[in-house]
Amino acid sequence: MSADLQERAAQAVEMATRAGADDAWATAAQSRDVEFEYRDGSLEKVKDTTSQNLSLRLFADGRYSTHSTTDLNPDRLRGFVREAVAITGALEPDEYREITPPALFDGRPSSDLDLVDDTVAKLDRDQRIAWCEALDAASHDHERVISATAGVYDGTSRSASASSNGFTGEHRSTYCWFGSEVTLRDQGDKRASDWFYAGGAHVGDLPDAAGVGREALQRALVRLDSQKGPTRKTTMVVDSRAAASLIGRLLRPATARSVQQGQSFWAGRIGEQSFSPVLTITDDPLIRRGLASRHYDSEGIAARALPIVENGVVRNFYVDTYYGRKGDMAPTTGEPSNLRIGTGDRSLAELLADAGDGIYVTSWLGGNADGTTGDFSLGLRGHLIENGRIGAPVGEMNVTGNLVELFARLAMTGNDVYPYSSTLSPSLVFTDVDFSGA
């Protein structure tokens, strides 16, 4: 199958150059995605979807365009490519649009990332329903449960790319996830809810389904009797599950595009001590069984570990070839992969004990962050930290500040890395954080 995709990509490139393109990049892909959802003791949804597509990037006489089709039949594809090349010739020139230089293909790793589990393609209805039933039973194991939805999601994907300047590459992966969302009856008309999902590339890495359902229920139970949180400046401990979102907001403007367009607080910080010495972030696409692992990115740039922040010092950000040319920056990669966040040697319980008092954040509820200034305001749910322990649940409150200043006040990181994310972060401890609530 992957050989057929490689052939389709190579054919599309050849068709494009014959039709008049100077350069072309084609990617052919196929995938299958299966969903089983179980609600309150009954199977509610079954979905089995297969798809295929071919995407094409064209470079012609200083002009550039992108096109896609779901029809990979060679005869019809030829007409599609001819029309795409003609459309490209009618566009305005862009001197910065060029195909990826072949030098960036060099050094592509060949290590086995172990992203494919043949078991996934062999999963049957009985196994998926058995998981759903175990999740559902565990999620309902309390008198206050109003409803619970369990889900199993699995799939396979394959892609192959080819270019007119010598690139060829293939990528295959599988995934299998399951979990539950639970809603409980709270005071009056109020409801308490939470969720928990686990998954990865391999079925053998999955935890016990009933245990995942119990975790979802427990996370909802500790939300009962939640009150509006207080207004205060205090220590903030961010749970490892919630840390990925905060790291994501920090890194969102760490791109050549944002920097070149004057919309990033990362501009001019390479080599500077911009954050706490506790903060280390590495983009690592070569983690075995990593959720975002790869041998190359969408431009064909060879994968390598990329230090973003080392002990608070900014080392790199994400530079694609186009904005690299526009901003006179050397390309690194334009796309994040797995993120490794530096860990400490303390458990969550020890971090809370060290904090004494403060706010323990377990999830975010909307909000915004300005990529140019770093100013942010985020809604949250969590708990008071009282005498070094998790206290009463709180919500209906915001945390405000500036991302650069916040991560300059990162005091500690835990050893409790959350495994079910491409952002492998432990719990994070920040000092002197502003909260607004009651």
Image (cartoon, rainbow, N blue to C red):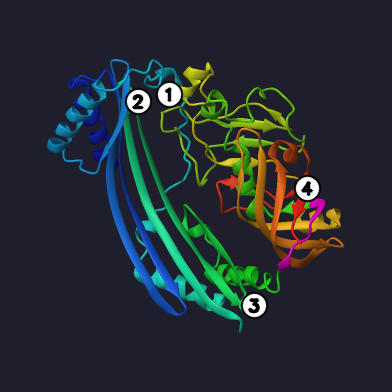
Q: Earlier in the sequence, mark 4 or mark 2?
A: 2
Q: Which residue is mark 1?
A: 105
254 vs 410, left or right, is left
Q: Which residue is mark 3?
A: 186
Residue nearest the observer in this picture, 111 or 9: 9
Q: SS for tag 4? A: strand
Q: Earlier in the sequence, mark 1 or mark 2?
A: 1
Q: Which residue is mark 4?
A: 433
**Stretch in magenta:** 227-235
- When the figure is inspected, residue 81 is found, relative to residue 47, above or below; the finding is above
Q: Earlier in the sequence, mark 3 or mark 2?
A: 2
Residue sitting at x 47%, y 45%: 114
Residue sitting at x 45%, y 75%: 39
Point out residue 382 in the picture as x, y percentages from the top left corner.
70, 61
> How many residues crowd around disc 4 within 10 Å: few (fewer than 14), some, or many (20 or more)?
some
Say which amino acid is labelled 3.
Asp
Does residue 190 appear in the picture of this structure? yes
Q: Which residue is mark 2?
A: 167
Q: Quadrant of residue 376?
A: top right
The span from disc 3 to disc 1 (Cα, nearest Å) is: 57 Å
Say which amino acid is labelled 2.
Phe
34 vs 231, left or right, is left
